[in-house]
Image (spheres, grey):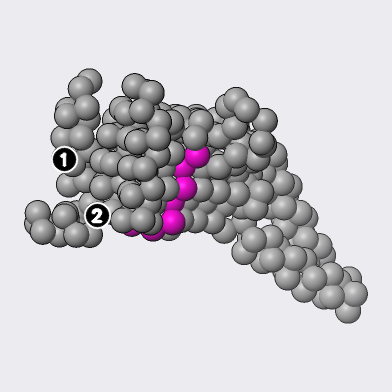
Amino acid sequence: MSLYSQIKEDFSNAYKNDPALNSVVDFLFNYRGVWAVFWYRISHALYLRNYKRTARIISGFSQWFTNIEIHPAACIGSRVFIDHGMGVVIGETTIIEEDVLIYQGVTLGGVSLVPGKRHPTIKRGAVIGAGAKVLGNIIVGEYAKIGANSVVVKEVPDNATAIGIPANVIEKGRCKDPFMHNMLPDINKEMFEYLLKRVAILEHILREDNKEVLEQDIQLEHIYETFIKAMKN
């Protein structure tokens, strides 16, 4: 695909991904993520032609203008959309395949100073939530979802959801709507809820030997074992 075709596709993709986009004026002044990708396309083309200094200058201008840092050596596929992109950082050896959605504050960074592949590979259709950090030479699989503010330091399988610090895979199976971040489970809330109920049951057992309470305790233990099993998958 030619450079012009890629840029044209990036622009039209913004209208598909954001229902709030209603006018050309709105597009020109409020969609820094699209403009960051636009300047990246130009700097990347120059970088591949060995005009590396010029590419870095354009990249620096884009960073100043958009507050989004994309190294010109990174490989970004078609229809990648950076939504509300303030603070996004994409490292030198990052590979992003087509149809990936990235929200504000995301870092696709490295954990090593050793030359070579140091940054993540984001496969087709993945969604990286706001503030997430994906670090190191790891793979985020096709149509995977990374929850907001998660820190991902190990690979995420295809069609999986990963959340937490460090991130754990808590769900497998492709989500039909990649925008439904409100459907991600709150594992901290679930764990605290379990602990509070456990303490309440144990206190009740200490007061009186109640068969019904003991049955509730067994049921709660089953819920806990199911939770731990889901965390390990």
Identified at 21% across, 45% down, the residue is 14
Identified at 55% across, 42% down, the residue is 109
Q: Is residue 110 visible?
A: yes
**Vertical position of residue 13 compared to residue 123: above or below:** below
What is the x, y in percent for residue 83? 32, 52
Query: What is the spatial separation of the Cα atoms under label 1 and label 2, in whole angstroms?
Result: 12 Å
**Vertical position of residue 122 compared to residue 134: above or below:** above
Instruction: Tell me which segment is drawn in magenta.
Output: 84-91
Q: Is residue 124 visible?
A: no
Compare residues 219 and 30 and report the one nearer the observer.
Answer: 30
Task: Left or right? Give the position of 12 relative to 140.
Answer: left
- Queried whether the magenta region covers residue 216, the answer comes back as no
Residue identified by numbered label 2: 31
Tell me the kind of residue under disc 2: Tyr
Closest to the camera, between mark 1 and mark 2, is 2
Task: Left or right? Give the position of 126 relative to 204.
Answer: left
What is the x, y in percent for residue 5? 17, 28
Identified at 27% across, 34% down, the residue is 42
Compare residues 210 and 179 and report the one nearer the observer.
Answer: 179
Q: Quadrant of the C terminus?
A: top right
Task: Tell me the element at label 1.
Answer: helix
Q: Tag on residue 218? A: none
N-terminal of the pair, mark 1 or mark 2, is: 1
Task: Tell me the element at label 2.
Answer: loop
